[in-house]
Image (cartoon, helix red, strand yellow):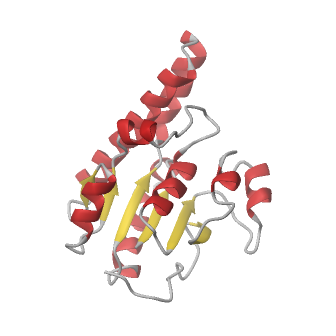
Amino acid sequence: MIVVKLGGSLLQSGALLDCLGKIEHTYQDQSVVIVPGGGAFADQVRAAQKQWQFDDRTAHVMALLAMQQMACLINGIYKQFAIAGSLAEIKTQARSGQTLIWSPDLTELDAAGVRASWDVTSDTLAAWLAAALSASDLVLVKSAPIISGTDLPTLAAQEIVDKAFCETVQNAPFTIHVINTQTTPWPKPKTHLI
């Protein structure tokens, strides 16, 4: 299984549709779960928290709702991909071979002890999901320019990945690829798992 995180900025940059097509064609013989970033919906949560000064727990819940909205948006424009929420749902639906879009389940993340902090964004949540699903690969697709071979601490310092990502993937059993939308070809795992 491959987990592909699509940065929320892909919506604003206009690259989202192209990336969905690349997922469909590049990973057609793979089980794939897409993790949507919160995009403009998450930006609104940040702005509202700044204005109204509510706590990080409230912002965390709202940011997960932003990811759920992006999951609905992706499904709305790419109906051949299905939405799945819990790990059990993903595992069941993955057997069909259909590409899935993760709509994160708050209760499941709470039970797993996922921190309610802006240091934990959809990057770290994608890493958590990849570990929970025993994925072979995690692909983070960004709109920011990425120099090939840049290590994860440098990407974190450049704010290309979130602050908690490096700690989360420290002993990751999966291969991590951080790519730009223009990267060609997209990385493929060596084994094919359906």
In the displayed structure image, the side of residue 2 where residue 158 appears, left or right: right
- Whether residue 145 sits left or right of residue 180 in the image: it is right
- The reply to whether residue 13 is in sight is no
- Residue in the image at 46% along x and 55% along y: 14
Q: Residue at x 43, y 29 (%)?
A: 61
| Residue 58 x %, y % | 48, 21
**In the rendered image, the vertical position of residue 184 relative to residue 162, given as above or below:** below
- Residue 127, image quadrant: bottom right
Question: Can the viewer see residue 36 in this picture?
Answer: yes
Where is residue 55 drawn, in percent x and y? 56, 17
Which residue is most to the top? 52
Residue 74 position (above or below residue 104): below
Q: For this rendering, which residue is in front, 84 or 180?
A: 84
- Left or right of residue 133: residue 179: right
Corner quadrant of residue 41:
top left
Residue at 39%, 60% (x, y): give it. 34
Q: Can you say which quadrant of the picture contains the C terminus?
A: bottom left
- The foreground one among 153 and 174 is 174
Image quarter of the N terminus: bottom left
Report how many numbered discs are placed on residues in the image.
0
Q: Position of residue 25 (x, y in %)?
A: 36, 80
Q: Position of residue 163 (x, y in %)?
A: 70, 45
